[in-house]
Image (cartoon, rainbow, N blue to C red):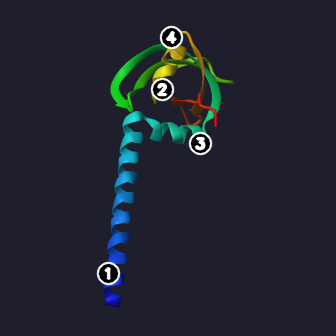
Amino acid sequence: MKHMGFIKKMVVLSFVLIIFSMSSCVTMMIDSLTGEAEADEIRAVGLPAEAKVLRIWDTGVKVNDNPVVGFLLEVHAEGLEPYEAETKALISIIMIPQIQPGAILKVKYDPQDPSRVALDIWEE
């Protein structure tokens, strides 16, 4: 009988681990589709800059009814000539009016590859 209690605990633990692993995989897949995985990398090592939104487009991906938006940006970084870069970001549907062409947004860019840009518009 003591072994049955141990077996039940092991089955429950195995089930919890499987669910945790599945949720981690789903999160990684969403981050990949939305561009957030790459954006997180850029934000971690990136330098601050401002960017003017030149064009936006719908990528066709949505998470909880919020669109992943493609951006063509004119980046203005200290010590560099202004340049164009593309990125994508998961944007709350209520923020869409604030990110139309002409808007100036905070971004971070990868100092090793300035073409890699991520929006940095969320308060921590």
Query: Where does label 2 land, which residue?
Result: 92
Is residue 53 at all visible to an observer of this figure? no
Which of marks 1 and 3 precedes in the sequence?
Answer: 1
Query: Where does label 4 land, which residue?
Result: 101
Callout 3: SS: helix
Quadrant of the rendered structure where residue 112 is? top right
Quadrant of the rendered structure where residue 102 is? top right
Query: Can you give x and y, in whole percent of width and height, for residue 74 in the image?
Result: 54, 16
Disc 2 or disc 3, which is closer to the eye?
2
Within 10 Å of disc 1 (Cα), the crowding (few <14, some 14-19, many 20+) is few
Separation (CA) of disc 2 from disc 4: 17 Å
- What amino acid type is highlighted by mark number 2? Ser
User: In the drawing, what numbered circle is on residue 77?
Assistant: none
Separation (CA) of disc 4 from disc 3: 26 Å
User: In the drawing, what numbered circle is on residue 7?
Assistant: 1
Separation (CA) of disc 2 from disc 3: 22 Å
Which of marks 1 and 4 precedes in the sequence?
Answer: 1
Is residue 39 at all visible to an observer of this figure? yes
**In what quadrant of the picture does the C terminus appear?**
top right
Separation (CA) of disc 2 from disc 1: 46 Å
The residue at the point 36 percent across, 51 percent down is 25
Query: Where does label 3 land, which residue?
Result: 44
Within 10 Å of disc 4 (Cα), the crowding (few <14, some 14-19, many 20+) is some
Query: Can you give x and y, in whole percent of width and height, for residue 101 in the image?
Result: 50, 10
- What amino acid type is highlighted by mark number 3? Ala
